[in-house]
Amino acid sequence: MHSRRKGNRRSNTNGLRKSETFEDFYGSHYGERWAALRKALCAPACDRSVLWNKFVKLPFESAMGDVKRVDDALLLQLFSPLGSGEMPPPAIDEFNVKAHYPLDYTTALAVELLGVQQFDLVLDLCAGVGGKSIAISQFLSNSASLTANEQRGDRCARLRRNIKEYVPSNYVPVTVTQRKPETWHDPSTYHRVLVDAPCTGERQLLQHSGKHAVSPLHWSLQACVELSHTQRGLLLRSIETCRPGGRIVYTTCSISPLENDEVVREALKRTRCQVELMHPPVPIGEKTEFGHIVLPDRDNGRGPAYYCVIHKISDKREESEDEDEDGNDDDSTSS
């Protein structure tokens, strides 16, 4: 369990040189590993897996063709094509439900770590276009519910369309919302909360830059720090929104410690709730201080993906002898 320590310990972001370049910052953090990691990040992603949609009314063999199971240990039915080919477009049944959805292995892991049960109330706070929401729905019954939220209008429109095409409303009740996630306020409502936080996305930046250095117009340490404040707010909202006894998964596709472990560190300090870290087994990647990270230089091109799993114990933090007396760090809405 985590409690606030004596004194007003400063965030680890305060000693940073805001003028650092992209290469300086990541080279300093990853050291000798950076050259190999950078090369792997510049390479195209090789994951061609798709999620079999359990709601479709079609024979598996005719709808999927020649495929292999990506990982038998996963509860989600993730498949990839045999050989070097691509998956064909998804077949559609008589009820206009599609047979499969493109979902990479690291995204599937985030949903698996959420540990969804069939009667849960689930919130996907930053749902994007809906891949994770479709995966979450595979675990739910018609007595459960899923709320999928996406603030951006274009993504929310695609989210609605994807939910309609993959999740029949008579199987799983899904509510799609277009709210600002930082201001979400449903205290102690959901059994499971997934927050796939907006992040720097260094792999995309490097691939966009090609052989050139990442432009200061596209990346700055100051912007990275500011984004980490937003991420911290999202995680604090997620903890508040989760029911006692429930679980939160914080995930990003960033390789920056500022957007991963440091966000968790600050959230653990500031939350008013009693929480503890969970460390379920992750089949790939490596441990970090508070979670787990998958990096493409050591995981066959997969990632980046960071995960932290948090168990909420109660709505109020337990008093302890080392509780910070000034109480300045318990504002869950501060940034």
Image (cartoon, rainbow, N blue to C red):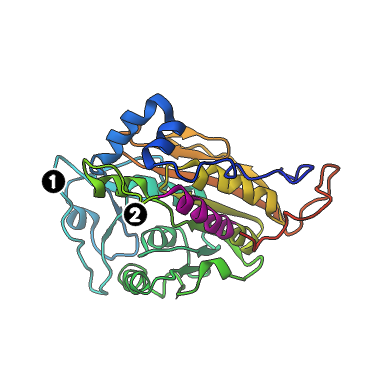
Viewer can see residue 230: yes
Residue 109 percent location from the top left of the image:
42, 46
Looking at the figure, which quarter contains the N terminus? top right
Kindly indicate the quadrant of the structure image that contains residue 98. Answer: bottom left
Residue sitting farthest toward the right: 321
Can I make out residue 115 in this image? no
Disc 1 marks which residue?
85
Q: In the picture, residue 151 is in which quadrant?
A: bottom left
Q: Nearer the viewer, residue 229 or 270?
A: 229
Q: How many marks?
A: 2
146 lies left or right of 78: right
Label 2 neighbourhood size at 10 Å, few (<14), some (14-19), many (20+)? few
**Depth order, front residue of 53/136:** 136
Q: Residue at x 75, y 55 (%)?
A: 328
> Mark 2 or mark 1, which has the lower sequence index?
1
Say which mark, if any, is on residue 52.
none
- Residue at x-position 76% and y-position 42%: 5
Q: Position of residue 254 (x, y in %)?
A: 42, 46
Residue 298 position (above or below residue 9): above
Q: Which residue is mark 2?
A: 217
What amino acid type should be assigned to the residue bearing mark 1?
Answer: Gly
Instruction: Determine whether, in the image, residue 309 is placed left or right of residue 82.
Output: right
Q: As drawn, is 272 to the left or to the right of 80?
A: right
Nearer-the-camera pick, 255 or 128:
255
Asked if residue 273 is among those painted magenta in the image, a careful observer would answer no
Q: Which residues are magenta?
A: 220-235
